[in-house]
Image: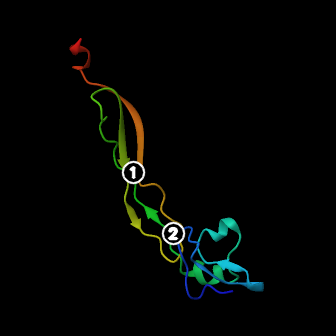
Amino acid sequence: GGCWHQCCPGRNNACWAPGARRARCYCDSYCERTGDCCEDYHAVCRRASVGCAVGPWGPWSGCSSPCGVGSKARSRQVTVPPRHGGEPCPDLKQRRGCLGEHPTCGMAK
């Protein structure tokens, strides 16, 4: 079975080739986790693969709620996109809870 025709990033059930004993073998990077890569996957796909690289996290945003429970977020950019079945990109956004404590919050009572 051979991957010479294609190498796919992530999990892609359409990215397969006929393997030994007419069983399918896979050429997506997920095959490394599931153990069903084609024999030449490493030689063909890994040689050319480029893993995703991301930049540093940006600053957290302000709290979405000025008073009480809200959320804030931050993000980062992809600096090198994955190619030829390289490691896919990690999360580019993070959220976390926050408590808005604006000076005017207690005034409404």
Q: At 47% across and 66% down in the image, what residue appears?
A: 52
Which type of secondary structure does the marked residue at label 2 adopt?
loop
Q: Position of residue 67 (x, y in %)?
A: 29, 25
Of the residues shown, which amino acid type is indicated by label 2? Gly
Q: Position of residue 18 (x, y in %)?
A: 68, 85
Q: Which quadrant of the figure has residue 97?
A: top left
Colour scheme shown: rainbow
Residue underneath mark 2: 51
Residue at image mark 1:
57
The percent coordinates of residue 46 (x first, y second) are 59, 77
Residue at coordinates 37% horizontally, 59% vertically from top-left? 77
Q: Quadrant of the C terminus?
A: top left
Residue at x 73%, y 80% (from the top left corner) = 23
Left or right of 36? Residue 71 is: left
Tell me the CA gap for discs 2 and 1: 18 Å
Q: Is residue 50 above or below residue 19?
A: above
User: Going 47% across and 62% down the picture, which residue do you hit?
Assistant: 89
Q: Is residue 31 left or right of residue 69?
A: right
How many C-alpha atoms fall within 10 Å of the one at disc 2: few (<14), some, or many (≥20)? some
Is 67 rendered above or below residue 24?
A: above
Q: Tell me: residue 78, above or below residue 15.
A: above
Local SS, label 1? loop
| 13 and 55: which is toward the camera | 13
Q: Quadrant of the N terminus?
A: bottom right
Of labels 2 and 1, earlier in sequence is 2
What's under tag 1, amino acid-wise? Trp
